[in-house]
Amino acid sequence: MNCIHPTPDEPGFATSEMLYIDPVACVDCGACVNACPVGAIAPDNRLDVRQLPFVEINASYYAPPVAGVKPPPTSKLAPVLPAAAVHVGRQPLTVAIVGSGPAAMYAADELLVQPGVRVNVFEKLPTPYGLVRAGVAPDHPNTKRVTQLFDRVARDRRFRFFLNVEIGKHLRHAELLAHHHAVLYAVGAPNDRRLDIDGMGLPGTGTATALVAWINGHPDFAHLPVDLGHERVVIIGNGNVALDVARVLTADPDDLARTDIADHALRALRSSAVREVVIAARRGPAYSAFTLPELVGLTGACDVVLDAGDHRRVLDDRATVSDPLTRSKLDVLATLGSPGEGGPASAPGIGRRRIRLAYRLTPRRVLGQRRAGGVEFAVTGTDELRRIDAGLVLTSIGYRGRPIRDLPFDESAAVVPNDGGRVVDPDTGQPVSGAYVAGWIKRGPTGFIGTNKSCSLQTVQALVADFNAGKLTDPVAKPAALAKLVRARQPEVVDSLGWRAIDAAEVARGADDGRPRVKFTATADMLAAAASAQRASPPARRLLARLRDLAEPMVS
Ligand code: NAP
């Protein structure tokens, strides 16, 4: 993120008495907190009194005080977020957040910075954290470490999980509003964008996003039919999801066996016949959708090749492109090897598994009668046809938002219409009172996990400003009534203690094999693990929670 300074190329590197974190660039991923060997990094809103001067010292590094000029904010949040003013006779701000992925958890974190605010998080799965659990590739464990920040947020006494509860099914929007000042939807973009060509839908076709969910043990995808009995896989689209899938499909299963990959996926990959994964993009190398760090990571970990024609395209693009980031991508692509003899249709043969990046291929149809046998492409902008044989054809052309019951929806952009996070009625152009959005359902499926930090902050600022301006109605129901209502509608609701029991059980299942965890992939198993902790009496529950807190550093 380039948020820690001075860097090796800046004055003061190696002589500075301390390092400084840029509050604008930092996304609170927690990576530096985990990596610091001396435990010297702490979030600004968790400092004790003696540490508070560091907030000012850190801020002054980025904008040294100038006489007569207002000093810069001493913390990233406190001055920009208006206090959730508790007016006489009003109840403290209480917010329902729907979804528990990064946008939801960052929003909860921002809200809980304000004293007195209460947050209830509703999630339809029995496990939280959305795409961090079900979308991040298992060989990217560092990315998953952001869950340590989320765990810390969830341990706040003013935070409550209602997991295994689906809003729109178990509870409606109006019911949530009766118990909260506001409802913030951070439900992501759960659908795939579909490619409308002949043959999609045949056995042997599917989407990369579904495969990622299968690899990650999402319970709804545990029984996805994935046939890896053929030598070649074609992935259409070359975003970061395509790279994730190609990397996992070509990885050494023994390496994956040290990750939290779902057991069913590991078994399938151990007996996989796949030797080559072709990632086919419709445009040229300069328009590659993957990001530079992911490309560098891919070329460092796998055998990645380019056909001779695509090598020429890289060189042609490099001669004309001026944007430094694109140039760097092209520089990396220019270093790749060639697949050797044979064109795209030739069999990859036995040997090390490899990934082939292919360009200017517009998909025309999936070949095959009863099951996929390959893809026919047109060379983009020409009538020339190219055929790539494959036993598995995956589209990886992006995610798509899904309508939320009781809220407006913009079908073309596949987002909830909003103004900086305030849901807006498209007919009147007016805000829908008490309804907010953050993350992919607000801005579309773009960016990485940390992008949600500023996205959620913007929404929370709008929400708190509306509360302070008296625009949000106090909940009519008593706080204790919510848990009763939820339990009546969904007796199998999982709370924080239940989730921590699931978490501990998964971690314990992986311990013997040196794995970070072995995931439950069936909802019933998750509920069984949660039930023992949830059945305990209140004092026993408090003791269990305390014991788990104490055990946390040893577990992680
Ligand atoms: P994406 O980055 O939007 O890439 C979509 C790809 O599909 C592009 O190559 C696009 O080509 C292609 N495409 C779209 N419509 C097509 C069509 N009709 N025919 C052929 N190709 C088509 O989507 P994604 O890979 O699903 O990623 C979603 C977001 O998650 C991105 O912001 C990504 O960076 C992020 N993500 C990040 C990580 C990470 O940081 N490690 C991992 C996974 C995902 P055109 O460019 O020609 O439209």
Image (spheres, helix red, strand yellow):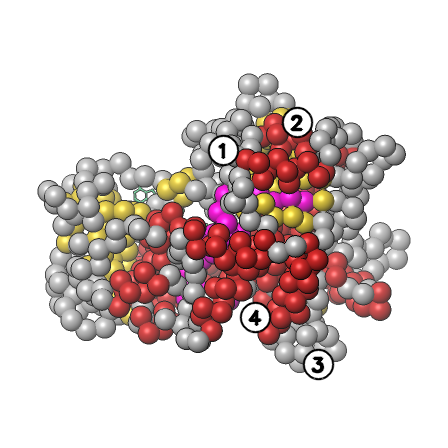
Residue under numbered circle 4: 556
494 or 362, nearer to the observer: 494
Specify the segment rendered in magenta: 119-143
Res. 15 mark: 3
Q: In which quarter of the image is the N terminus?
A: bottom right
Mark 2 and ligand 1: say if the CB distance to the nearest ligand atom is below 8 Å. no
Residue under numbered circle 1: 169
Badge 2 density bin: few <14, some 14–19, many ≥20, Cα 10 Å = some
119 or 169, nearer to the observer: 169
Q: Position of residue 134 (x, y in %)?
A: 44, 54
Amino acid under label 2? Ser
Q: Where is residue 507 in the image (x, y as percent from the top left)?
A: 49, 67
Q: Closer to the N terminus: mark 3 or mark 1?
A: 3
CA gap between label 3 and label 1 equals: 59 Å
Badge 1 density bin: few <14, some 14–19, many ≥20, Cα 10 Å = few
CA gap between label 2 and label 4 equals: 42 Å
Q: Which of marks 2 and 3 is in front?
A: 2
CA gap between label 3 and label 4 equals: 33 Å
Q: Closer to the N terminus: mark 2 or mark 4?
A: 2
Q: In which quarter of the image is the C terminus?
A: bottom right
Q: How many labels does the image show?
A: 4
Q: Closer to the N terminus: mark 2 or mark 3?
A: 3
Q: Where is residue 533 in the image (x, y as percent from the top left)?
A: 58, 57
555 or 238, nearer to the observer: 555
Q: Closer to the N terminus: mark 1 or mark 4?
A: 1
185 is higher (above) or lower (below) than 3: above
CA gap between label 2 and label 1 equals: 21 Å
214 is higher (above) or lower (below) than 248: above
Badge 3 density bin: few <14, some 14–19, many ≥20, Cα 10 Å = few
Q: Closer to the N terminus: mark 3 or mark 4?
A: 3
Quadrant of the image occupied by residue 424 = top right
Task: Classify residue 137 as left or right of residue 97.
Answer: left
